[in-house]
Image (cartoon, helix red, strand yellow):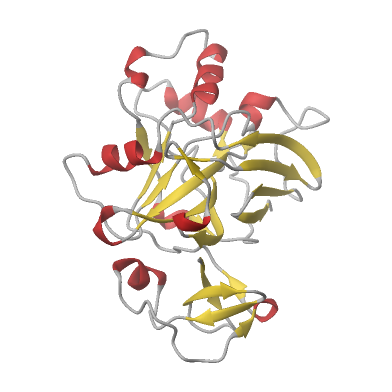
Amino acid sequence: MRLVTYTTAGGAPRAGRLEGDAVVPLAAPTMLDWLRGDGRADAGEAPVPLADARLLAPVPDPPSVRDFYAFEGHVATGWRRRGGDIPPAWYDAPVFYFSNPASIVGPGEPVARPAATRELDFELEVAAVIGAGGEIAGFTLMNDLSARDVQRAEMTVGLGPAKGKDFATALGPWLVTPDELPLRDGRLDLAATVTVDGYEATRTTAADMYFPWDALVAQAARDTRLRPGDVLGSGTLERGCLLELGPLPGGRWLEPGDTVTLAADGLGELSTPIV
């Protein structure tokens, strides 16, 4: 099942499911209600043509956003650039930082380049969304936009990223239930790409995740509780950002006027205009 949060004619956000080129309204008033197990049935209203619906982030206001660091290739490249090796503790358990749930944007929603950065980067990720019972209810694409020059300075303090990350995280275009996606050894076997204004910046796979998804869920839940709507980012796929790939043609990072589009088999396309 593909689930969306949408609006029509400027109305209040609704939860729906995709059926062909139409959105079928659900009885649940919001996606958080659906994730809690309420209103799983259709609302009994007429389907809305997808062309008449504006899709928002599947979970526009998640209770929390944890972003993991689960792709060994991406981690190794980052440490090599800093002149080091992956710390042994990275292999003990999946690590994450908390991102900003107040800065979620949806498909097609513009993101302003922060004034402090000239090294704006995309990050190609897959995110899991938690449902009732603390289990994964679905997966979606995630673009953890990053101000690399700001982040680089912040990280010298030793507390992790802050203003280099929390200005915008894009999710969408829809939430796909696990039964509709290929899982192999607990990992999504999906090809994925990133394009910037039609230029293919990378082609990679989500299958190379070092830790399986159940390990990420277990680590997130350890000594606390997960709530319906909590978002767990996979971390950047290998070769899933300019920090690994190098700048775009012309030696530049993302700039106003660019549109970056993440795409993956089964998960659709997530486009973000930079303004």
Outermost residue to the bottom: 45
Q: Residue 169: in sight, yes or no? A: no
In the image, 226 versus 164, the foreground residue is 226
In the image, 97 versus 117, the foreground residue is 97
In the rendering, at what x and y percent does residue 17 appear? 52, 74
Q: Residue 10: in sight, yes or no? A: yes
Asked if 69 appears above or below 72 in the picture, the reply is below
In the rendering, at what x and y percent does residue 10 appear? 57, 82
At x 44%, y 83%, the residue is 42
In the rendering, at what x and y percent does residue 170 appear? 55, 53
Q: Quadrant of residue 95?
A: top left
Outermost residue to the left: 223
Q: Quadrant of residue 218?
A: top left
In the rendering, at what x and y percent does residue 107 appear? 61, 60
In the image, 252 versus 127, the foreground residue is 127
Asked if 269 appears above or below 217 in the picture, the reply is below
In the image, 162 versus 239, the foreground residue is 239
At x 41%, y 57%, the residue is 102
At x 55%, y 78%, the residue is 7
Is 97 on the left-hand or right-hand side of 221? right
Asked if 209 appears above or below 174 in the picture, the reply is above
User: What count of labels does the image hold?
Assistant: 0
